[in-house]
Image: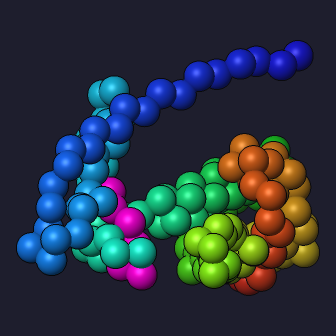
Amino acid sequence: MSSHHTFKAKLNWRLNLESSGRISKNHQVNISGKPSLEVSADKAFKGDASLHNPEDLLLSALTSCHMMSYLYVCGQNQIEVLTYSDNSVGYLEVEGSGKGGFTSVELNPIVTIKNEQNLALAKELHAKANELCFIANSCNFPIHHKAKISKD
């Protein structure tokens, strides 16, 4: 049985010339009932380095979605996760024409579980979590997992 879900975002941008004469790329993204996101281009693309950029948001969405999928599959397998952290890295390549895209992402989860006898299974479940992750399933680049699992 499949289900359909709709997500909506509203973007607001207004022409604003910076002191340098460049057009500002700063804008707001609003999702009903949630705090506004202040977004810009990455500094390398003449944006405001103090704001999140679309590349940050894609990487954070992938990192967060993987964790939630992982917690789900661990729950299905009676593995009690005590802590989960990740220092993910995304690799973006841009051609001379300006066309570009992510070439890969590396997730580096560090997970602490309660029961030592589940260490091997807990590590294997990252592959299952990747299969279930909505964001990973929407990406056209490889996602590598370099998980470290330990017992409390």
Left or right, 19 with reference to 23: left
The quarter of the picture where residue 42 lies is bottom left
Residue closer to the observer: 85 or 63:
63
**Does residue 73 appear anywhere in the picture?**
no
The span shown in magenta is: 39-44
Q: Residue at x 9, y 73 (%)?
A: 19
Q: Which quadrant is home to the C terminus?
A: bottom right
Total label count? 0
* Residue 130: % across, % down: 81, 57
Q: Residue at x 75, y 74 (%)?
A: 103
The quarter of the picture where residue 29 lies is top left
Q: Is residue 41 magenta?
A: yes
* Residue 106: % across, % down: 71, 78
* Residue 139: % across, % down: 75, 55
Left or right, 87 with reference to 28: right
Identify the colour scheme used. rainbow
Q: Which quadrant is home to the N terminus?
A: top right
Q: Residue at x 64, y 22 (%)?
A: 5
Query: Quick check: 107 above or below 76?
Result: below
